Amino acid sequence: MTVSTAEIEEAAGVLRAGGLVAFPTETVYGLGANAEDAAAVARVFAAKGRPASHPLIVHIGAAAQLADWVDDVPATARLLAARFWPGPLTLVLRRGRRVSLAATGGLETVAVRVPDHPVALGLLAAFGGGVAAPSANRFGSVSPTIADHVRSELGDAVDMVLDGGACQVGVESTIVDATSDSPSVLRPGGVTREDIEALLGGTVAVPETSQVRVPGQHPSHYAPRARVVLVDPQKVVAEAEAARELGHRVGALLPSRLSPSATGAVAGLHAVVAVPDSMAAYARGLYGFLREFDRRGCDLVVASLPVETGLGLAVANRLRRAAGPRPAA
Ligand code: AMP
Ligand code: MG
């Protein structure tokens, strides 16, 4: 679980040679390639089964390097970077020449962040360049929060996996379009809207569907194999019971503070996870819970949305995407 300096050096060598390295960040595990190497970036898309038009996030080692990777840094972007980096905030800015168009899915904007994890920062320092990395999972599925998730999902498609233990935030970064001085949130994540608004001193828009291509905003993303249905918190138990009676293998994500009698009523279900009281713990555990339902063979998961403030906005966003319409098989 602890990553040695020798392993980090080896991983930097893999990146230099055009290979793929999965590495821990504070949000989820990333699948990294040299952001300046179009062929290496193409391997990331192939390993994930991700359409080439869907852009990756370029990870850099320090805010001071930002100007090397983007064309223009508006004052607001500078403020956001100074306040939240290293951390779970991604800034979308105008693409600098160094970034391969393969990494931006052909867009003239690029998503950049400085991750807050010693292994990720060690790798970035040893490598020296930018690392284009989406989450290290197959396209559309649940992001990995431990190294084993990466190994079991991507197998030999990744050249090296750095095992830094469990990710502390557990949901992806907040993506902010910072190309202008009136930024908007493209994807809620580890930095809360409230924290961004407190810094900027105004309200920040969170468009329901963004104009920019963000695969995380498509229906059915961050989804387990089991179908996810969302109901009112007080109806989770009854809905789960009803589905079980219809013959489903049902998992339930029980809202916190349900009465003990309600909790007792779900004893016959296939898998039950009680949602942690703290939203930080819920975010940290969310993808592990969804994977657990798959591991237990559930075909249906009944859940409810948390209150959408703070990290609850990101958790609710991921649950909605998990419950989104599936493409026809
Ligand atoms: P993932 O780490 O799998 O969530 O993938 C990276 C995320 O960053 C995706 O949701 C991308 O759509 C988003 N992203 C990367 N570049 C851009 C960009 N130029 N504009 C908007 N979103 C972007
Ligand atoms: Mg992803």
Image (cartoon, rainbow, N blue to C red):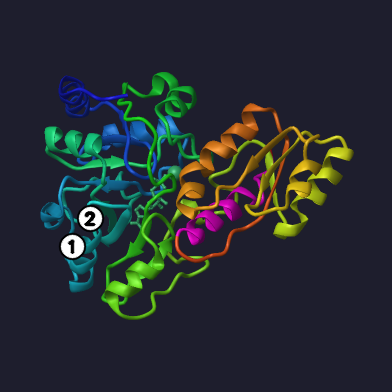
Is residue 324 positioned above or below 126 on the image?
below
Dot 1 alpha-carbon crowd within 10 angstroms: few under 14, some 14 to 19, many 20 or more:
few
- Residue type at the position of mark 1: Ala
* Label 1 C-beta lies within 8 Å of the nearest ligand 1 atom: no
Per the image, is 78 magenta?
Answer: no
> Residue 71 versus residue 170: which sits nearer the camera?
170
Per the image, is 319 magenta?
Answer: yes
In magenta, the rendered stretch is: 311-328
Point out the image quarter for the N terminus. Answer: top left
Point out the image quarter for the C terminus. Answer: top right
Is residue 40 positioned above or below 199 on the image?
above
State the residue position of label 1: 82
Contact check, label 2 and label 1, Cβ < 8 Å: yes
Mark 2, secondary structure of its residue: loop
The residue at 22%/63% (across/down) is: 83
Is residue 205 positioned above or below 281 on the image?
below
Pinpoint residue 50: horizontal percent, then vertical percent.
45, 39
Dot 2 alpha-carbon crowd within 10 angstroms: few under 14, some 14 to 19, many 20 or more:
some
Pinpoint residue 241: horizontal percent, then vertical percent.
83, 44
Relative placement, left or right, of 222 versus 145 is: right
Pinpoint residue 6: horizontal percent, then vertical percent.
16, 20
Is residue 194 positioned above or below 44 on the image?
below
Mark 1, secondary structure of its residue: helix
The residue at 52%/40% (across/down) is: 287
State the residue position of label 2: 85
Relative placement, left or right, of 186 versus 103 is: right
- Magenta stretch: dominant secondary structure: helix
Pinpoint residue 92: horizontal percent, then vertical percent.
30, 60
Residue 264 location, quadrant: top right
Relative placement, left or right, of 167 versus 112 is: right
> Residue 267 versus residue 18: which sits nearer the camera?
267
